[in-house]
Image (tube, helix red, strand yellow):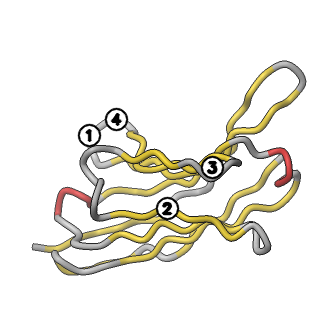
Amino acid sequence: QVQLVESGGGLVQAGGSLRLSCAASGSTFSINAIGWYRQAPGKQRELVAAISSSGSTNYADSVKGRTTISRDNAKNTVYLQMNSLKPGDTAVYYCYADFPVGQDIVSSWGQGTQVTVSS
């Protein structure tokens, strides 16, 4: 199993920056991919960014050019650097990790961290 703890959310003005952190523990060596989803009030959860075990990255179109995902394997931590934040980025951000259990791929989720961008 993999446990995830997020930090770094908060209130920021439009145009500002935040860096979210996700610390993983447990069977971190088995993680296939790790990243971030977000969910705004009344909306579905959407993928923001992900990074694979090989280091390849994937970003939502809405954050491309403003967001960078990175991982520090020594610290078992993934970071989400968000710049030029917009009010539309306001959401609860959840860290997730995919890892194999037998023949299946399962996901662990963090508790979420609130990001609020004021106009």
Of badges 3 and 1, the one in the foreground is: 3
Residue sitting nearer the eye, 53 or 85: 53
How far apart are labels 3 and 1 at the CA level?
25 Å
How far apart are labels 4 and 3 at the CA level?
19 Å
**Residue 77, percent from left and from top:** 68, 68
Q: Quadrant of the N terminus?
A: top right
Left or right for 8, reference 96: left
**Residue 71, percent from left and from top:** 63, 65
Of badges 2 and 4, the one in the foreground is: 2
Q: Say which mark, if any, is on residue 42.
A: 1
- Amino acid type indicated by mark 4: Gln
Q: Earlier in the sequence, mark 3 or mark 1?
A: 3
**Residue 18, percent from left and from top:** 38, 77
Q: Earlier in the sequence, mark 1 or mark 2?
A: 1
How far apart are labels 1 and 2 at the CA level?
26 Å
Quarter holding residue 74: bottom right
Q: Which residue is mark 2?
A: 69
